[in-house]
Image: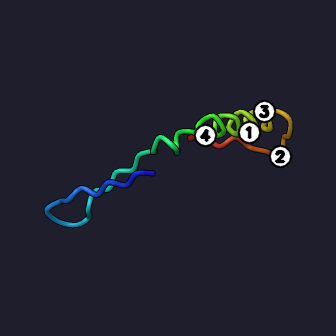
Amino acid sequence: MNRKVIATDKPPLKVEYSMTDFGKTLIPLLDMISSWGEEAIKWDDKIEEIKV
């Protein structure tokens, strides 16, 4: 994770976050976990989907 602090005239400071190339190697794993969660919703009626 990259963290960039941007100076402002008064508080609060502005902070931007971005993924590093190494962090981006987790994207396939996160996609698989997401797919698993979507399937789990179909299999178990006790699991509820959270709509964002």
Residue, disc 3:
39
Q: Residue furthest bottom?
A: 11
Name the residue that disc number 1 marks: 37
Q: Residues within 10 Å of mark 3 (few under 14, many from 20)?
A: few
Q: Amino acid at mark 4?
A: Lys
**Residue occupied by mark 2:** 46
Whole-Å distance between the Cαs marked 2 and 3?
A: 13 Å
On the picture, is 6 further left or further right than 24?
left
Q: Nearer the viewer, mark 1 or mark 4?
A: 1
Q: State if disc 4 and disc 2 touch (CB < 8 Å).
A: no
Q: Where 26 falls versus 8 (above or below)?
A: above
Pointer 3 and pointer 1: residues touching (CB < 8 Å)?
yes
Residue at 17% x, 65% y is: 10
Whole-number angstrom distance, CA of label 2 to CA of label 4: 16 Å
The kind of residue tagged 3 is Glu
Kind of residue at disc 2? Lys
Element on which disc 2 rests: loop
- Disc 4: CA contacts within 10 A as few (<14), some (14-19) or many (>=20): few
Q: Position of residue 52 (x, y in %)?
A: 56, 41
Q: Tag 1: residue type?
A: Gly
- Crowd band around label 1 with a 10 angstrom C-alpha radius: few (<14), some (14–19), many (20+): some
**Few, some or many C-alpha atoms within 10 Å of disc 2 (few <14, some 14-19, many ≥20)?**
few
